Image (spheres, rainbow, N blue to C red):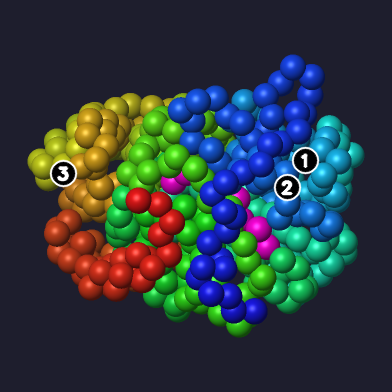
């Protein structure tokens, strides 16, 4: 089903009064003054009119909370206006206990008694059959993204949209902030031969969009007639370029290794080290802000600072990961210190670290499965870095593709 863009943009800006849930507590749709109102809060304030008469399933995880830190599943389950019949968990699971590349499996939510289904590693007809088995009419998506193409939640959204169309289910996407501002897109655009669960379609590495905007882009650019009946519920009060700390919303780690908004800020660049033999800081208290390996010394920080990259300093650091790569080994490396968030480009910083690590440390290497090509969306970054290219040369290689994506992206932005 193809809708006009006006029809896809979601609920009207005015909202009716919501009934109170829980004695002495603020209604879910009424956050304290000055806060951003999330898509869920606007849905609740409108009396869940979008879900009236529907058997509802929700894709969510620990980030699906209200402004006063109640989980949306608990709130909807307790509200007689919503017929909530199923919960679906993405990577890391509904309760967020699984590490990268894992999920919690199926079960029953002990708080509500609702059946919980596992979407991880399911797509197409297999996922559509799951929606049918759950007995839902409408699938609600409410998950906090971090703004990077290889963060799998946005591809869970994409897969759910495709599967919902196959199963003839409607999709409602509840928006949340892009925690790193979403002011602009950055980095290479995926080439389709390199598509995977860390990138299904050609979007930029740092896409600069919210999940509702991405849903509109997926529908308009990639799914078309194969897309579902789609509605989005935008936020109120969020401005493009605002970082998460400016929203007034509580931060819940979107996954076990993104503990803070500062982690999210670095993630689009330093997650590239997943594709190398170096540690990306998993198993430390500051994953993705620390990178390194056994045998790395102070020359790396010196070389990285010598690039003069805007908004960031690189400090010599030592750490011992408790799990993942180099677990239990003393590693030398660098810690990123972002001193100007507006000027900082995490993708350029990540490329700068790859370039300098290769130059100063003889142990530098790529993972044998060439995971770096999946993360960057082609083999170009890897081959250019191996050829000795600098940051500007690597970034220049993706400039034309990024400009094309940026023009497409503009058509689906919901916020000033």
Q: Is residue 259 visible?
A: no
Residue under the image location 62 percent in, 26 percent down: 68
Q: Residues within 10 Å of mark 1 (few under 14, many from 20)?
A: some
Residue under the image location 43 percent in, 64 percent down: 412
Q: Residues within 10 Å of mark 2 (few under 14, many from 20)?
A: some
What residue did someone put label 1 on? 76
Name the N-terminal-most of marks 3 and 2.
Answer: 2
Residue under the image location 70 percent in, 74 percent down: 165
Q: Is residue 316 left or right of residue 306?
A: right
What residue did someone put label 2 on? 48
Q: Residues within 10 Å of mark 3 (few under 14, many from 20)?
A: some
The residues tagged by marks 1 and 2 sit, at their Cα atoms, a distance apart of 9 Å
Foreground mark, 3 or 1, reads 1
Q: Secondary structure at mark 2?
A: loop
Residue 169 location (% of width, % of height) = 75, 68
| Discs 1, 2 touching: Cβ within 8 Å | yes
Foreground mark, 1 or 2, reads 2
Residue at the limit of the structure toward the bottom, as seen here: 225
Instruction: Please say if 134 is above or below 183.
Output: below
Residue 153 location (% of width, % of height) = 57, 54
What residue did someone put label 3 on? 309
Q: Is residue 173 magenta?
A: yes
Magenta stretch: give its range: 171-178
Q: Secondary structure at mark 1?
A: helix
Residue under the image location 19 percent in, 38 percent down: 311
Residue 301 location (% of width, % of height) = 20, 35
**Residue nearest the viewer, comparing 309 with 227:** 227
């Amino acid at each position: 089903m193809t809708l006009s863009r006006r029809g896809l943009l979601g609920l009207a800006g005015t909202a009716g009064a919501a009934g109170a849930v829980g004695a002495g507590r603020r209604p879910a749709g009424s956050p304290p003054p000055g806060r951003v109102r999330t898509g869920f809060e606007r849905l609740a304030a409108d009396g869940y009119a979008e879900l009236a008469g529907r058997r509802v399933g929700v894709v969510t995880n620990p980030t699906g909370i209200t402004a006063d830190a109640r989980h949306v599943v608990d709130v909807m389950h307790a509200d007689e206006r919503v017929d909530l019949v199923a919960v679906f968990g993405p990577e890391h699971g509904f309760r967020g206990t699984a590490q990268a590349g894992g999920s919690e499996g199926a079960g029953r939510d002990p708080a509500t008694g609702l059946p919980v289904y596992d979407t991880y590693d399911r797509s197409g007809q297999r996922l559509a059959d799951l929606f049918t088995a759950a007995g839902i009419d409408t699938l609600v998506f409410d998950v906090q993204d971090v703004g990077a193409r290889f963060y799998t939640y946005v591809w869970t959204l994409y897969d759910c949209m495709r599967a919902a169309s196959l199963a003839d289910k409607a999709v409602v996407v509840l928006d949340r902030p892009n925690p790193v501002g979403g002011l602009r897109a950055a980095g290479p655009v995926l080439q389709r031969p390199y598509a995977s669960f860390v990138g299904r379609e050609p979007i930029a590495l740092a896409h600069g969009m919210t999940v509702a905007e991405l849903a509109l882009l997926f529908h308009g650019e990639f799914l078309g007639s194969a897309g579902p009946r789609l509605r989005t519920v935008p936020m109120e009060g969020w401005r493009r370029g605002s970082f998460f700390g400016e929203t007034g919303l509580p931060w819940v780690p979107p996954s076990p290794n993104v503990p803070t908004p500062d982690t999210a800020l670095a993630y689009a660049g330093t997650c590239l080290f997943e594709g190398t033999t170096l540690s990306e800081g998993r198993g430390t208290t500051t994953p993705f802000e620390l990178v390194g390996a056994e045998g790395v010394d102070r020359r790396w920080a010196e070389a990285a600072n010598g690039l003069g990259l805007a908004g960031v300093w690189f400090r010599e650091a030592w750490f011992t990961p408790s799990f993942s790569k180099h677990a239990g080994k003393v590693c030398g490396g660098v810690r990123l210190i972002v001193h100007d968030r507006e000027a900082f480009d995490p993708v350029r910083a990540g490329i700068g670290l790859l370039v300098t690590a290769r130059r100063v440390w003889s142990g530098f290497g790529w993972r044998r499965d060439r995971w770096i090509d999946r993360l960057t969306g082609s083999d170009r970054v890897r081959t250019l870095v191996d050829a000795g290219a600098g940051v500007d040369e690597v970034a220049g290689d993706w400039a034309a593709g990024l400009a094309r994506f940026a023009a497409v992206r503009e058509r689906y932005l919901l916020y000033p």
